[in-house]
Every structure is written in C-alpha cells, then in structure tokens.
Image (cartoon, rainbow, N blue to C red):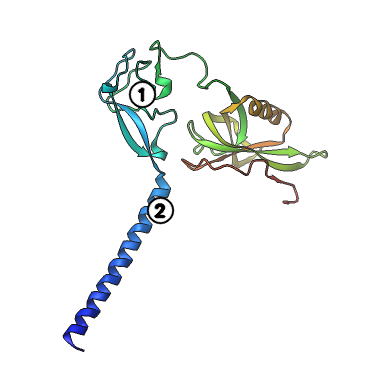
Amino acid sequence: MSRRRRALLLLGLALLLGGLAASDVARREAALDREIGPLLPVVVARTQLPAGTEISAGRLAVRRVPARFAPPGSVASPASIQGLKTAIPIPAGGFMLASAVSESGTAAPGPPVRAGERVADVTAVAPLDLVQPGTHVDVLVSQEAGDGSTGKTVLALEDVEVLAATPAAGESTGDDPSRPRVAASLRVDLRQAVYLAAAQAFARELRLLPRAAGDRGEGAQGLEVGSDLR
C-alpha cells in the first residue's frame, strides 16, 4: 500500500471516529436536556432584601435555570414586580416568588391560591416521597360497583399542583404497606373541587400519580378502564 493511500485511509478513519464521538456527545446532551428540562428565566435578588423593601429593577437580576429546579411561583420578569414590596426577607441570590411580594409588604392572608382557584383536600393512595408541595400529579378515581366491588377506574384530573402533603392516618390502605396513603391539598378550580369532594365521599379509592418535573402534557382525561381491564 502506498504512503499516500495509507494516509487517506487513516484520515478517513479519523473522520469516522470523530463523527461517531460527536454523535455520542450529542445523544448524551439530548438525554441530559430531556432529564433536566428546558432553561427558564427566573428573577433573583441581586443583594439581600429585608422585608418591606420596595423592589426596583436595580435590585433584581434574571437567571436561567433548568425547569426542574425552578421553584413553583417563581417570577419570570422583573417588570411584573417592580414597585411592590418584599413580604419576607430575601437573601442575595434568592428566588423572587410571587407569594413573597405584595403592595403593602406583608404576606397576603388565606390559602396560596389565585382568583378562581380552590384548595381541595383529599386522602389518596400515593408515595409520599414523590408527592411533595410543588409537584404535579394526575388523579385516578376508582368507582364502586353496585355489588360493592371495584368498578371502573377513571383518569379524573391531569396536571394538578400539590400544595401540601402529609402521611394519612394509618399511612397505608388496609394491611398492605405497599399502598401508602397521603393527605394532600391540591390546587384546582371550583368544578374540580366539587368533583373531588364527591369522589372522596362516594368513590372506592383515589390515587395520585406523580408527574415528571416540567411534564405539562394533557389529553387523556376521561380515560376509563373497567374491572375487566377493558
């Protein structure tokens, strides 16, 4: 084999290996992006802000963080809170949360919901370590058949925010420790709150399905499966 031909062969092999390495790096980066979610803008305090401090643009900065690390209620734009006051002390670099600012500089009374929202308290089967404040869940409702057996199971609600969660009395369903129960407070609208109250009273079981951070997909609500699994 001539020296020229050998050089071309080595060059081609080097290009092939370089392409494979670049492809592997791209796959790893894509997998990491899927895991941590897209980068979101969040507003933070440039310096420490005592409670009652009037908020100006010079006191704020914008950072971009992965969606899974952005706290619920974080502010995305400095303009949206300019002129308001801090209701609690904010450390330098701390996230600016909508619940931490107000016109008067004092925390608003009442539950952490917005106009038109309600807090629905339910007891459901769910893993407490995965159902924590700020996480989102889907709600399954298993109905009771006329003979007292379990009827159909319905995907009743999707992408519901958890406001609070604690172990329910007894912590598990019956004598089965593999089915832990939690007492959870959920952020819902009025119609959903009424439905959950009825389901808690008349359904056989409620179950919360934790969603991945940043997963806001919907479209399967109303899906039903009967006791015959059809």
Lower position in the chain sequence, tag 2 or tag 1: 2
Residue at disc 1, secondary structure:
helix
Look at discs 2 and 1 and give the one toward the viewer.
Answer: 1
Question: Residue 193: x and y, percent?
Answer: 64, 26
Residue closer to the observer: 60 or 200: 60
Question: Residue 92: x and y, percent?
Answer: 27, 25
Q: Mark 1 belongs to which amino acid?
A: Ala
User: Which quarter of the figure has residue 84?
Assistant: top left
Q: Name the residue under label 1.
A: 79
Q: Which residue is drawn at 67% across and 44% down?
A: 223
Quadrant in which the N terminus appears? bottom left
Q: Mark 2 belongs to which amino acid?
A: Ala
- Quick check: 218 left or right of 64? right
Q: Name the residue under label 2.
A: 31
Q: Which residue is drawn at 48% across and 30% down?
A: 133
Task: State whether residue 12 is above or below residue 49.
Answer: below
- Quick check: 154 left or right of 160? right
- Extreme bottom residue here? 1
Residue closer to the observer: 36 or 226: 36
The label number, if any, that marks residue 102 in the structure image: none
Q: Which residue is drawn at 29% across and 70% down?
A: 17
